[in-house]
Each structure stands twice: as structure tokens, then as C-alpha cells.
Amino acid sequence: MTVVAIDGPVGSGKSSVARAVAERLGWLYLDTGAMYRGVGVLAAEQGVPLDDEAAVAAVAAAADLRFDREGRLHAGERDLSDAIRTLAAGEAASRVSALPAVRRLLVARQRELARDADVVMEGRDIGTVVFPDAAVKVFLTARPEVRARRRAAELRAKGEDVDEATV
């Protein structure tokens, strides 16, 4: 297993760079933020309060999160890729990612997913927490106005009514 870890804030270009690198290398692409979004979406759909650590951790444990070769997130047989790209999913991800039990479960799952394949993994703490010994670590950033413009454009493309000042 070889890991390329790509870190950075929202809108810095992590996904674009990570996808391009994974495609170029023929490696698996994993978006760890998608996993937190997926848990948030599933918990909300099940009526689980997002501040109930034990209940959200139970959702995470039962979710069977995995990625296909195109980098799309699945929970069991269900493709969550569209459901996780909303403003509400992002807000849910922020809440569930702050829960230590959920973080422990998802970090373990991320390491498990990378055990059998060479991967390009992107997220907020990939190179520092999840894979501190990654073969390659990259930290991307961009000016705040560029990040806001990118994020707003992504949300608008999904049908969200947002402006740059709110993201």
C-alpha cells in the first residue's frame, strides 16, 4: 500500500488535484470528507440527533462505507454521491466529524480501505492523523475569496441557492 495524502481547507482544490493524481497513477481515489458527509446524511435520514455521539457512531459503524473506482461513495448498495454534496450535508459533516467516536471509526475505516490498494486520499487531516507516514504529503491552500467562489459554484451546480458570502 502506498498513500498520497492531500490536505487543505474547503475550496482549496483538494478534490480536483487528488482525482487528477489518482487517475494519472491509476490508483484509487478516496475523499475522506465524503465519509463524514455520508454519516451525517444517513444519521439525519434516520432521525438521529447529530450531537448524540453514541447514536451517530452506531450509524457510522453500520454504514458499510466504501468507494467505487470512480471515487463515488456507497453505503452498502446505495450510492450517496449526490446526497452528500449539499450545503446541509456539509453542515452535518462538520457536526459529526467533531465526535471522537465517529472520528475513531472513520479513521479506522480509511486505513482499512487503503490497506489493499495504492490510494490518493484527500481530507483535512490525512497527512497528520490518518496517514502521518504517507509516502507523499501535499497541503493545498487558496485565497479565501477563491475558496468561497469555488465552493459556491460547486453548490450552485447541485441546485443550491447560495452566494459566496454564505459559504
Image (spheres, helix red, strand yellow):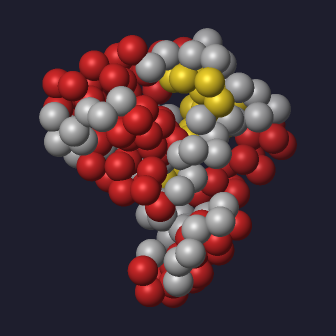
Residue drawn at x 64%, y 71% as measured from the top left: 156
Residue 86 vertical position relative to residue 150 in the rendered view, above or below: above
Residue drawn at x 30%, y 43% as measured from the top left: 97
Judged left or right of residue 87, residue 154 is right
Q: Nearer the viewer, residue 106 or 47?
A: 47
Q: Is residue 155 visible?
A: yes
Residue drawn at x 44%, y 86% as measured from the top left: 165
Judged left or right of residue 167, residue 83 is right
Q: Quadrant of the N terminus?
A: top right
The quarter of the picture where residue 79 lies is: top right
Q: Position of residue 106 (x, y in %)?
A: 37, 28
Residue 150 vertical position relative to residue 103 in the rendered view, above or below: below
Q: Quadrant of the C terminus?
A: bottom left
Residue 111 vertical position relative to residue 141 in the rendered view, above or below: above
Q: Is residue 111 visible?
A: no
Q: Nearer the viewer, residue 145 or 24?
A: 145
Judged left or right of residue 52, residue 16 is right
Judged left or right of residue 137, residue 16 is right
Q: Nearer the viewer, residue 52 or 65?
A: 52
Q: Position of residue 44 (x, y in %)?
A: 36, 39
The quarter of the picture where residue 127 lies is: top left
Residue drawn at x 30%, y 34% as measured from the top left: 47
Q: Position of residue 49 (x, y in %)?
A: 22, 39
Q: Position of residue 116 (x, y in %)?
A: 61, 12
